[in-house]
Amino acid sequence: MPPPNPVLRRQVIQVYKDLLNLGKDYPQGFSYFQRRLHKAFSSQTNLEDEQEIKKGIERAEFVKKGRDDSQSALVMFPLTTVHLEIEAL
């Protein structure tokens, strides 16, 4: 197994931190959000193909921007207009 691409690793960590920061206003509490986000990212740790990792980063960026997608189950923050697609990460 080759060492992970440091650029992709940095991007994954940054998008995780960004999403985690958005979770501070989550109605069910930050700890609930944090556990769900961690579980979503942890489920993708087996990805080794750079293209698949890039797709995951793009998906997380999509979620971060809060766009609506008919194929995803979005969780809407009533306190803000941010949408997070936690399950699909």
Image: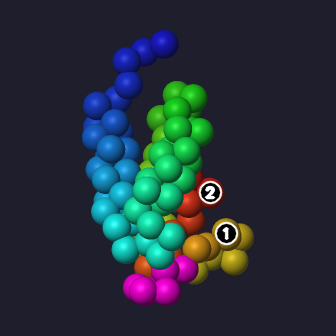
Name the kind of residue labelled 1 in the image.
Ser
Q: Which residues are magenta?
A: 76-81
Dot 2 or dot 1, earlier in sequence: 1
Q: Main secondary structure of the magenta part?
A: loop
Residue 67, horizontal then vertical, whole percent = 51, 78
Q: Please tell me in which quadrant of the rendered image residue 65 appears.
A: bottom left
Residue at screen point 69% across, 77% down: 70
Proximity of marks 2 and 1: CB atoms separated by less than 8 Å: yes
Picture layout, residue 21 above or below residue 8: below
Q: Is residue 16 visible?
A: yes
Instruction: Give the camera-side residue of 4 and 82.
Output: 82
Q: Is residue 78 magenta?
A: yes
The residue at which mark 2 appears reads as: 88
Residues packed near mark 2 inside 10 Å, few (<14), some (14 to 19) or many (20 plus): some
The residue at which mark 1 appears reads as: 72
Residue 64, horizontal then vertical, whole percent = 42, 68
Residue 45, horizontal then vertical, whole percent = 52, 33
Residue at screen point 31% across, 53% down: 17
Name the kind of residue labelled 2 in the image.
Ala
